[in-house]
């Protein structure tokens, strides 16, 4: 048998590793400085760095997708910078241009390079992006799953163009897009049958009817401060898959019984419901929801002034899986209502409560005494539930 030690000496080093091994090493680097310096070794390593990069964002972005994806480029990213970067990193799957306020519609022509590989795109506060830019996105990025257009100048026309081109969309953020109405939402919900989460908060032209007939995959809707109507509420839950619903600050068109449809059985999968500042919603709606949404785990009723004793009794009796309840500054939460919560809600873990003028110190102390298993907190939570981008990953 040949002695290995006596065989011809073969020089080996890291430069002899095949590209796929070097790519594997690059992807396992945790340090940002190591990521940036990897490509300085030689042209081959630079090419591996370029084709291995999957995420890119800038220092001006609002949300860190991945610390290693941060670019050291000047925050004032313009069309030239974007073109240089996207021609270099053509294998990107996640791109955030959020906060790049000087970009305009023509800047997005560089998206042709990562193109169909892009799965998520963030354009938050890109004020120069309009329907023309959205049309460019639709042409080059047909496989988008996540898109955020917060405060962009997109209208129903642009949204329809995007929806028809990107049928795989799952998560969409349209918050503070004043030009988007029910027509655009209808186009989105009918074209994108894999839709899972939608944010349309503070879109004043949306009543909710555009969601009518939406896909059963739609489980997350944030429609805070929209001009929702009873028919719009029915539209949002019409798919039957809703698990998280935020309609806080609902319009005055919703009367005391305006949310009764939520408890009709269509929204039986609902786990989190934010009704904060729904001042006109009354006991009829609360009773229907308490009975018809047995899986409810967190319910924000802060500043719901029309909820009275019968409403609190319904919550205590029917919300058997409720773990978190928000009752901050509810004017009509009295001692009798607190007693109903104390005697029911057997799985309740946290009660957010402050500013309830009709509650006596004695009632609160009795609650503490009999329900030591419940933590009382005085802070008022403005936001509850999961992040819209993470919902689809849960």
Image: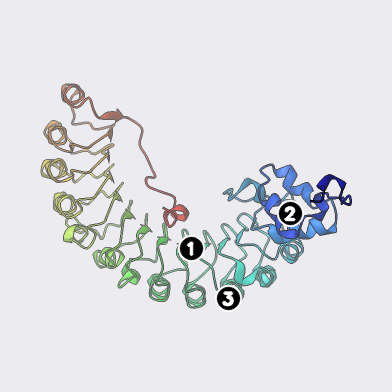
Q: Which mark is residue 253?
A: none
Identify the disc placed on residue 135.
3
Depth check, mark 3 against mark 1: the one in front is 3
Location of residue 337 with respect to 248 vertically, above or below: above
On screen, residue 69 versus residue 277, left or right, reads right
Q: Earlier in the sequence, mark 2 or mark 1?
A: 2
Q: Are marks 3 and 2 in contact (CB under 8 Å)?
A: no
Between circles 3 and 2, the one closer to the viewer is: 2
Q: Position of residue 154 (x, y in %)?
A: 52, 69
Nearer to us: label 2 or label 1: 2
**Cα–Cα gap, marks 3 and 2:** 38 Å
Seen in the picture, residue 224 relative to 236 is either above or below; the reply is above
Please name the residue shown 63% across and 46% down the image. Answer: 67
Q: Residue drawn at (28%, 50%), measured in percent from left and top?
A: 271
Where is mark 2, residue-wise? 22
**Dots 3, 1 in contact, CB < 8 A:** no
Rendering coords of residue 370 (x, y %): 16, 24
From the image, tell me which residue sits under label 1: 177
Which image quadrant is residue 237 in?
bottom left
- Give the distance between the C-alpha atoms of the residues marked 2 and 1, in whole angstroms: 44 Å
> Which mark is first along the chain, 2 or 3?
2
Of residue 286 and residue 71, the one placed in the foreground of this image is 71
Pick the residue in front: 160 or 31. 31
329 sits to left or right of 113: left
Instruction: Say left or right for 238 vs 137.
Output: left
- The residue lying at 58 percent from left, 49 percent from top is 62
Q: Position of residue 99 (x, y in %)?
A: 62, 54
């Amino acid at each position: 048998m040949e002695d290995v030690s006596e065989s011809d000496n073969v020089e080996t080093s890291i430069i002899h590793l095949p590209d796929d091994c070097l790519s594997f090493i690059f992807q396992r680097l945790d340090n940002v400085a190591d990521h940036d310096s990897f490509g300085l070794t030689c042209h081959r390593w630079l090419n591996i760095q370029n084709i291995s990069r999957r995420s890119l964002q800038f220092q001006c972005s609002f949300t860190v997708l991945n610390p290693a994806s941060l670019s050291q480029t000047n925050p004032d990213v313009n069309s030239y910078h974007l073109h240089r970067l996207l021609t270099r990193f053509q294998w990107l799957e996640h791109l955030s241009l959020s906060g790049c306020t000087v970009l305009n519609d023509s800047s997005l022509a560089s998206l042709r390079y990562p193109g169909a590989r892009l799965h998520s795109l963030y354009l938050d506060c890109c004020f120069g992006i309009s329907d023309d830019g959205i049309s460019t996105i639709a042409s080059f990025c047909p496989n988008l799953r996540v898109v955020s257009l917060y405060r962009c100048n997109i209208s129903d026309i642009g949204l329809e163009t995007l929806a028809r081109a990107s049928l795989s969309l799952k998560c969409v953020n349209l918050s503070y897009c004043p030009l988007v109405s029910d027509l655009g939402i209808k186009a989105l919900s009918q074209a994108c049958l894999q839709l899972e989460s939608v944010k349309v908060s503070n879109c004043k032209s949306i009543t909710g009817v555009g969601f009518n007939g939406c896909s059963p995959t739609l489980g997350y809707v944030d429609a805070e401060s929209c001009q929702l109507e009873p028919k719009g509420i029915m539209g949002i839950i019409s798919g039957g898959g809703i698990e998280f619903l935020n309609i806080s600050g609902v319009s005055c068109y919703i009367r005391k019984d305006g949310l009764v449809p939520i408890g009709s059985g269509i929204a039986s999968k609902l786990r989190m419901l934010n009704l904060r500042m729904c001042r006109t919603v009354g006991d009829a709606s609360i009773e229907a929801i308490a009975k018809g949404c047995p899986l409810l785990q967190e319910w924000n009723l802060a500043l719901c002034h029309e909820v009275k004793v019968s409403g609190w009794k319904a919550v205590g009796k029917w919300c058997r899986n409720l773990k978190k309840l928000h009752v901050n500054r509810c004017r009509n939460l009295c001692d009798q209502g607190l007693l109903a919560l104390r005697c029911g809600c057997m799985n309740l873990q946290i009660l957010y409560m402050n500013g309830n003028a009709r509650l006596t110190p004695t009632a609160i102390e009795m609650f503490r005494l009999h329900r030591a298993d419940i933590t009382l907190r005085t802070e008022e939570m403005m936001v509850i539930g999961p992040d819209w981008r993470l919902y689809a990953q849960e």
